[in-house]
Amino acid sequence: MSSPTVLLLALVASSTPPASSAPVPPPVPFQTKVEDPMLAPVPPASQQVGTWEQALALVRERSTNLRTAEAGVQRAEGRWRQALAALLPNARASASAAHDFLNSDTPVGVFATPALEGRKPTTPIVGTVSASLSQSLVDVGAWRNLSSNAAAERGAVASLQDMRRRLTLGLARSLVATVAAERAAELNRVGLLQALERSALTTRSFDLGASNQLDVVRVNQDVALARGSLVAGDEQLRRAREALGIALGFGHAVGVASSFNLNGLMEDARKACTPLEDLESRPDLVSARAQVESSRDSRRQASAGYLPTLGLTSNLQGVTTDPDFGRFSSWSIAAVLSVPIWEGGLRGGLVREREGIEKQAEQTLESNRRDASVEVEQARRGVDVAQALVKTASESRELADRTDRLTRRSFEVGRGSSLELVQSGAALRQAELTLALREFELVQARLDAFLTEARCDW
């Protein structure tokens, strides 16, 4: 066989695959394995709340602000009772036993009266008993003082109701803020994980010669930024837990259990509080109006000090006698008319002081009314704004996710740059975090809109 024929047969044999050869498997894609201690979640708080009822019970039990408001009601009740005492009968009884060491045969302070009927006071020790009764008949100032303290008591009760409303609102905000911080911390770890995966992918591409050193530096810079966001988010979570602990009446951090139903928080708040018919019936405005009434009656009480007062007094006196046990020696009833003449200008200064207090209370009422009106308007508008922000954040997150997936695919096939990869990853992290925060802000906005026009009687 000639050499060309041998060469041709060799080429045909080499170009024909063997009948027993198996298909070549597709290449295995590069799998990134990321391990980093910062990916471990924040340890849970030593104490956690699982339901709204549990949290509200802790506030009711441990809140110092609530105890202070309740003590204010107690003080107002006490002042009203003191003012009422000036209009009710005042009875007093006293007894004494006396002995004159220089004149032992002479009764001390006892004179013969017809009521003794010839009996002699006991010697050397004489015992006396006396009783007095006084009743105010005409005292305009006392009535004004009673009216002033009654209004102050109504104001204290309204302040207690407003404190309950504010504590409910503060508790709801603390719970939402803590859950939001928990979610943000979780998203920060997801973002760091994605940044580390991109870093591993870029490093692998650099080892294979498909990327340069600048790509590696850019991606590592993004990892550093993700770590910084994670550290800041963890600190925000710790502060949120501490704020919740303070709201619940503790001196340490309190967390929220994973089973806590944040979506049902609005219904729970409706069980604790009732909506108002109009803004003027909000407890803080009721309290401010009551303070105006109290200060007005207090000023009138000071002005009534120029008027005379009329009262009735009765005195009964008894003495021990010999041979009987004792006799009543006198009983008198007198009407007392008291007319103020001059006290050095004290009454005029008191009237001017009360007038200033009344004006301050009026201005406080007007200021509170304006603040409440703006607060309600902002709360109502806040729900619409929060809903619009959630919608835009959701759309932004979807676009950021699509952009990141397309950018990673382009980078894997060598068409995209590391700068685009870093930017898309950072945008996705920010979009996810923004969406989560917007959703929590919507829950908070609905709670604010309800509790700004509610009365809490728990």
Image: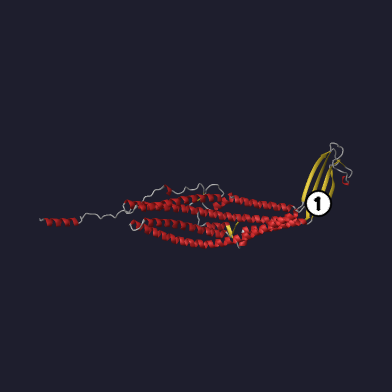
- Tag 1's secondary structure? strand
Q: Disc 1 marks which amino acid?
A: Thr
Q: Is residue 133 above or below residue 399?
A: above
When asked about the image quadrant of residue 337, the answer is bottom right
Q: Position of residue 112 (x, y in %)?
A: 88, 44
Q: Is residue 188 above or below residue 325?
A: below
Q: Please identify the quadrant where the N terminus is shown.
A: bottom left
Residue 298 visible? The answer is no
Q: Is residue 202 left or right of residue 454?
A: left
**Tag count:** 1
Residue extending farthest left: 1
Q: Position of residue 382 (x, y in %)?
A: 53, 61
Residue 314 visible? The answer is yes
Q: Please identify the quadrant where the C terminus is shown.
A: bottom right
Q: Is residue 127 left or right of residue 425?
A: right
Residue at x 72% of width, y 51% of height = 82
Front position in the image: 24 or 309: 309
Q: Position of residue 203 (x, y in %)?
A: 35, 51
Q: Position of residue 295 (x, y in %)?
A: 69, 57
Q: How is the image coloured?
A: secondary structure
Q: Residues within 10 Å of mark 1 (few under 14, many from 20)?
A: some
Front position in the image: 169 or 105: 169
Query: Which residue is labeled 1 in the image?
Result: 313
Residue extending farthest right: 118
Q: Is residue 152 left or right of residue 57?
A: right
